[in-house]
Structures are given as C-alpha cells and as structure tokens.
Image (tube, rainbow, N blue to C red):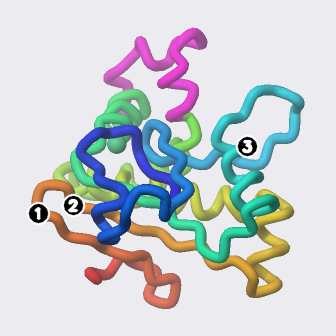
Amino acid sequence: MISCCDSRVHVTSIFGADQGEFFIHRNIANLVPPYTPDGQNHGTSAAVEYAVNTLKIAHLIVVGHSSCGGVQGCHAMCSGHAPELEQKSSFVGRWMDILRPGYDRIKDLPEDDQLAALEKEAVLVSLENLMTFPFVKARVEADELTVHGLWNDIGQGGLEQYDPAQRRFVSI
Ligand SMILES: [Zn+2]
C-alpha cells in the first residue's frame, strides 16, 4: 500500500484491517517516481522493490485522498504561484515534480475541478510509473501482481477505484 503522509488518511481502517496486515509506504501525495536506477537514495523505489521482489505481494494499492496538501502545493507550483517550491533546495518541490505530467493533463479543466482531478492524477501517474519498474511489469504481465488505484474522500469517507476499462474513477 502506498499512501500519503497525511495523518487524516487512515490506511488500515479504510479496509477494516488490523495492524500488521499491510506493508505500507507513505510519502507526500502518494507518489511513485519513475524507475531511475542511478545509484542514489530512493526510499519509495526501495519499498516497491522489497514488497514486490521479497514479500512477493499479489496486490499493490496506491491510495490518493481529498484535500491533499502535497497536491495543492504541486498545483500552486505548476501554475506559477509557489516560487519557493521551484527552488532546487526544496525537497517537496522536487518530489512534486513527479506529478507535473499529471498537472499538464488537468490544467485546462475548470478551475474548481482541477485539485480533485490532480489528486486522482497523483494515483494514475504513480500507477504508470510503477510499470516502468521492470520487476513490477514482469510480475503484472505474469498475472502474479495486480496494481490498483484508489481515491479516498476523507471528508465524506467515500472510496473510489480507478477502472481502467472506463478510464475513470468509480465509487466502490
Ligand atoms: Zn496528501
């Protein structure tokens, strides 16, 4: 399970699960970066590698959520309202660069719809990037691993799942 750091996302209670049932990695805006084997420190990629290659998980779930501060920061940065996040020294800004391709896909929507759409893009970009990891792609293609995208409405408590066939999120 990959979810946001936000304390309002109750990862296990969404599923009625107990402690110890999920291998959970949390980061700002539940993002998975593209596969980049450059010898540097990659916490999220390490968690994915361990879960897939060592734990041999059958399901990998990316959970996005409403009112995500990381996504709001990305939106502000990409729309030119957060110059501090453009600094090379901003770890948050450089992390949110992962979501720039998602911003490009939602930037022409009505303004009121953009943040929720970008929260869902944070899930979709992560699912796309997961498939750039050769060991993820191989296990998915061998039917040994399924990846899922969810979006949690933390205000209303609703849950939506991405349906690849319909290319949209549907309530579950
Ligand atoms: Zn968040």
Looking at the rendering, which quadrant does residue 166 occupy?
Answer: bottom left
Residue 11 forms part of the magenta stretch: no
Residue 171's disc is none
Q: Amino acid at mark 3?
A: Ala
Q: Is mark 1 within 8 Å of ligand 1?
A: no
Q: Earlier in the sequence, mark 1 or mark 3?
A: 3
- Ligand 1 quadrant? top left
Please name the residue that numbered disc 2 is placed on.
153
**Above-or-below relation of 170 to 13:** below
In whole angstroms, how far apart are the C-alphas of marks 2 and 3?
A: 28 Å
Q: Are the residues tagged 1 and 2 within 8 Å (C-beta)?
A: yes
**Above-or-below relation of 127 to 88:** below
The mark lying in front, picked from 2 and 3, is: 3
Please name the residue that numbered disc 1 is placed on.
156
- Can residue 114 be seen in the rendering of this structure? no
Q: Is mark 3 within 8 Å of ligand 1?
A: no
Please name the residue that numbered disc 3 is placed on.
46
Q: Is residue 33 left or right of residue 19?
A: right
Kindly state the secondary structure of the residue where label 3 is placed.
helix
In whole angstroms, how far apart are the C-alphas of marks 1 and 3?
A: 33 Å
In x, y percent, where is residue 110?
22, 56
Q: Is residue 161 left or right of residue 36?
A: left
| The residue stretch that appears in magenta | 79-96
In whole angstroms, how far apart are the C-alphas of marks 1 and 2?
A: 6 Å
Q: Is residue 120 left or right of residue 95?
A: left
Kindly state the secondary structure of the residue where label 2 is placed.
loop
Q: Residue at x 41, y 15 (%)?
A: 83
